[in-house]
Amino acid sequence: MERPDAREMLYEGKAKQVFATDDPERVIVRYKDDATAFNAQKRGTVAGKGEVNNAITALLYPELEGYGVPTHFLARLSEREQLVRRVRIVPVEVIVRNRAAGTFASRYGVEEGRPLDPTVIEFCLKSDALGDPPMNAATAVALGHASEEELEALFDLAAEVNDYLLARFAVAGLDLVDFKLEFGVTGDGDLVLADEISPDTCRLWDAETGDKLDKDRFRRDLGGVEEAYHEVRRRLEATVGRPLDLPEFDDDHQHEHDHAALRLDLTGEEPHDA
Ligand code: TMP
């Protein structure tokens, strides 16, 4: 792909910058080494993190597209930059938890690592100032952050992403404990996966040893942060194309039904007889 020029900076977040291009529907995302935690109360840098997270996201998003998940990703442009579709970010962060950890473990007083069945999918308001507060579906709708239809779509897409990532990280010897997703709406009105998937936004434990290979090393001052990020990249790159143990994702969203029973009831009505 011809490399589009970056024009003015449209936005600067904690870990990335967004630049306009000459195409109003496309923007360039530049990944920084800056690291924050606890809603930016803790700040630092992780050398090379921008390159690693750009590479990991650029590896996973096309794979997710191949699995049937629409994303904003278009192309990796350089070590730190990628071209993506311009979207309006839905201010609802979707957190998927396969095991208890982090704020979930402390909120409910359970041990980190406890498997969660069913998988827990949470919505949080995207607001550092408010500490990304958890929000149920009614709250998100009542406050105008998303429509009921959008929330249902976010839930289903997050479940599909989890199906894929669990299997994908497993072949790389990594246990996907939990992660956060963000979604956006394109100029055409399409809801797509946006933002990044990286050791910044996932908890990844070594499947053999349980070692943490993610941002908890930074959050908790465990040391070896750079090495952990590089190791995740190395393992993912070394396992590209390996067969995955995946549930089928067909165009009729056949296995959406598996998740339907777990979906938050947005209306408060009793489910109809099936
Ligand atoms: P938590 O345990 O802090 O609630 O985080 C759950 C997962 O979501 C963990 O993998 C980190 C990720 N996450 C982010 O990437 N950004 C955020 O702003 C939050 C709150 C969580």
Image: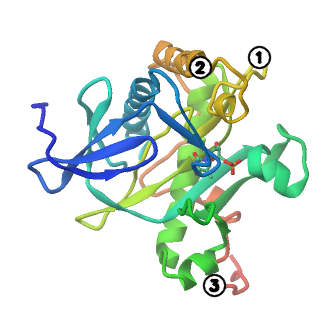
In the image, taking residue 12 as reference, residue 109 lies left or right, namely right
State which quadrant residue 89 falls in.
Answer: bottom left
Please state which of residues 194 and 221 is positioned toward the viewer in this rendering. Answer: 221
Element assignment for label 1: loop
Q: Determine which residue is flagged by label 1.
A: 208
What quarter of the picture does the N terminus occupy? Answer: top left
Residue at x 52%, y 77% (from the top left corner)? 148
| Quarter assignment of residue 123 | bottom right
- Residue 251 horizontal side relative to residue 100, left or right: left
Relative to 98, is 115 on the left or the right?
Answer: right
Q: Position of residue 131 (x, y in %)?
A: 63, 61
Residue type at numbered disc 1: Glu
The answer to whether residue 245 of the structure is visible from this angle is no
Q: Amino acid at mark 2?
A: Ala
What residue type is disc 3 on? Thr
* Of pointers 3 and 2, the one earlier in the residue sequence: 2
Q: Residues within 10 Å of mark 3 (few under 14, many from 20)?
A: few
| 210 versus 164 height, above or below | above
For disc 2, the neighbor class at 10 Å (few under 14, some 14 to 19, many from 20) is: many
Front in this rendered view, residue 183 or 117: 183
Q: CA distance from mark 1 to mark 2?
A: 11 Å
Q: CA distance from mark 1 to mark 3?
A: 43 Å
Disc number placed over residue 172 in the picture, else none: 2
Q: Are marks 3 and 2 in contact (CB under 8 Å)?
A: no
Question: Observer-nearest residue: 15 or 63?
Answer: 15
Q: What colouring method underlies this structural image?
A: rainbow
Residue 265 drawn at (x, y percent)? 67, 76
Q: Is residue 246 above or below residue 91?
A: above
| Circle 3 residue | 267
Q: Quadrant of residue 221?
A: top right
Does dot 2 land on a helix, a strand or a loop? loop
